[in-house]
């Protein structure tokens, strides 16, 4: 799965990019969304505002167990392993009754690289260290 996190805020973003970010549910800073591999193309349009990359199963398990919520901001009752198994079968989070985005905190210890440059000099764009970033934002 692909994990996308919005890094930059809303000021100074072109209206067409705001529309794309709203469509993929990255409406505010530090929002996180999961995508399938085939949906990776839309992320290239807004790669200067988000960080995205391949997420491993252990980080995904932590993300779901700590940050997944039902509508009404209620905690989930299923285990993270069951949810991951259903996601691999082709279902999405909305089908499972879970909000399709996760609200994260700013990373502990700060960003290790620039938030204005693309990877490898910064954290934006396709980031190979996305798992480390997500773990520090939980």
Image (cartoon, rainbow, N blue to C red):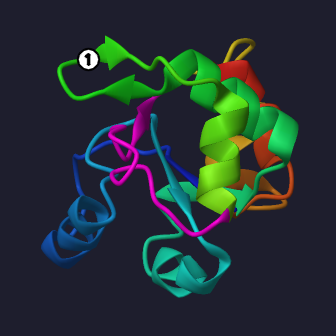
Magenta span has 90?
yes
Q: Nearer the viewer, residue 56 or 111?
A: 56
Callout 1 secondary element? loop
Where 126 falls versus 112 (above or below)? below
In this rendering, position of residue 60 left or right of residue 50:
right
Where residue 56 sits: x, y (%)?
Answer: 84, 48
Q: In terms of secondary structure, what is the magenta stretch mainly?
A: loop
In this rendering, position of residue 127 left or right of residue 34:
right
Where residue 33 sits: x, y (%)?
Answer: 48, 50
In this rendering, position of residue 66 left or right of residue 98:
right
Where 22 falls versus 71 (above or below)? below
Residue depicted at 46% across the width and 82% down the height: 42
Where residue 127 sits: x, y (%)?
Answer: 76, 58
Image quadrant containing the N terminus: bottom right
Residue depicted at 67% across the width and 45% down the height: 84
Magenta span has 127?
no
Question: Can residue 42 be seen here?
Answer: yes
Residue depicted at 54% across the width and 87% down the height: 41
Residue depicted at 44% across the width and 71% down the height: 46
**Pointer 1 local density, CA inside 10 Å: few below 14, some 14–19, many at least 20:** few
In terms of image quadrants, where is residue 102? Answer: top left
Question: Can residue 104 be seen here?
Answer: no
Residue position for label 1:
73
**Count of residue discs:** 1
Image quadrant containing the C terminus: top right
In this rendering, position of residue 31 left or right of residue 84:
left
Where residue 97 sits: x, y (%)?
Answer: 32, 40
Q: Which residues are magenta?
A: 89-104
């Amino acid at each position: 799965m692909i994990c996308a996190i919005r890094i930059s805020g809303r000021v100074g973003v072109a209206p067409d990019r705001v529309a794309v970010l709203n469509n993929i549910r990255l409406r505010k800073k530090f929002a996180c969304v999961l995508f399938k591999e085939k949906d990776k193309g839309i992320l290239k349009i807004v790669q200067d505002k988000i960080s995205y990359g391949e997420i491993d199963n252990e980080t995904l398990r932590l993300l779901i167990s700590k940050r997944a919520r039902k509508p009404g901001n209620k905690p989930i009752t299923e285990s993270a392993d069951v949810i991951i198994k259903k996601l691999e079968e082709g279902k999405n989070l909305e089908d499972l009754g879970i909000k399709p985005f996760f609200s994260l905190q700013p990373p502990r210890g700060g960003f290790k690289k620039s938030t204005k440059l693309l990877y490898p000099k910064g954290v934006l764009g396709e980031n190979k260290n996305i798992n480390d970033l997500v773990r520090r934002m939980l």
